[in-house]
Image: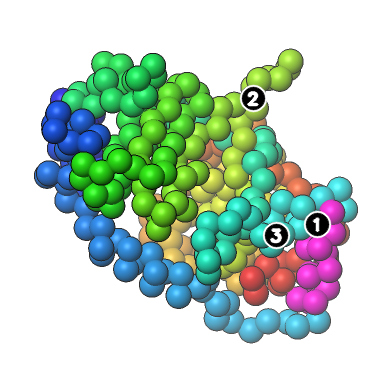
Amino acid sequence: MGLVRNLGEVYGVFGQFSPQKDPHNLLQVDYLTGDSANFDGLTRLEKLVRKIGPPKWPFAINEASRQRGADIFARHTDQGGCVDCHGERPGQFRGIGVQTWATPLMDVQTDSREYDVLKREATTGVLAGTGLPFNRLGPSDKQFTILATSVAGSIAQKYTPFGETPATGFVVQDLVAGKQLSLALPPSQQDLLTAYRLRAPVLSILAPQFKYESRVLHGIWATAPYLHNGSVATLADLLNPSAARAPIFAVGRAYDTKLVGLAKVQPRSTAVRVTTGCDDRNSGNSRCGHEYGLNLNPAEKQDLLEYLKTL
């Protein structure tokens, strides 16, 4: 069975997933027998999360500083601002009442190891041969493609009436592997049309590009440590050059309200985070990259941090 014997556990979800070949099934595979996913419960949780919203900064705010910081945030990138990548602009339409943001993909010289992880291969087990007629999964394939196939197949089987001809298609695409899987979803699930799409690195003349998606910074104060691999302890550190960021920092519950992130001293924790520099960008722990706002003076940086606390 390979990877698909217990796919959820492999990917850290800790769910049980045991698909079986089924020639009588519209999808040729029975994805749901032995699948521990609670679809109704997950739907309710997603709705509740949308209602909760981002956490609010629980400490005092210097309003004059916050207003100055808002003006700095609204500057263009070359002027030390953030709005070009992290501004709130409407994204793709996913349905009535569903708000998405336009979040650009950029290579900002951060750690590249995640691309290696996404390209790992594994045996496909009973999913071998599924997919489009001319682009089926082989005996082994990219782990991401196997995961996407499994998730999409489970959703399609859950929400598509068995035996009926699908009215719309659901395409899951892994551009690195060059695979496509076309499945059916009812109109109510069409917001999943662009889910599980892995964009391949775009090769340039000099070096490969490792692009990651930016984000709207709602609740950013509560998400330390920073960068996609958690290699920077505070937002203040993120406004410094990579070489000036702490190579080792303590991890725990103690919070620094001025630097906005993990406090340097963590009295109740002995955990530490060890990072690498730009000389080892592919370590998985590199603190390299995202060198923006470096031209701001110390007062401007503090004003910007004051504004970021309130998003």
Query: Which residue in the structure is indicated by mark 3?
Result: 89
Residue 32: horizontal and vertical position, in percent?
17, 45
Residue shown at 67% from the left, 46% from the top: 104
Name the disc covering residue 81, or none: 1
* Disc 3 packing (10 Å; few <14; some 14–19; many ≥20): few
Q: Position of residue 182 (x, y in %)?
A: 39, 33
- Which quarter shows the C terminus? bottom right
Q: Secondary structure at mark 1?
A: loop
Q: At numbered mark 2, what does the secondary structure look like: helix, strand or loop?
A: loop
What amino acid is at disc 1? Gly
Residue 301 vs residue 93: left or right? right
Most foreground residue, 43 or 21 = 21
As drawn, the label of residue 202 is 2
The residue stretch that appears in magenta = 65-76
The structure residue drawn at horizontal position 39% and vertical position 19%, both measured from the top left corner, is: 135
Q: Is residue 14 left or right of residue 83?
A: left
Of labels 3 and 2, earlier in sequence is 3
Q: Name which residue lies at 72% across and 71% down.
A: 307
| Residue at 62% across, 61% down | 217
Nearer the observer, 311 or 27: 27
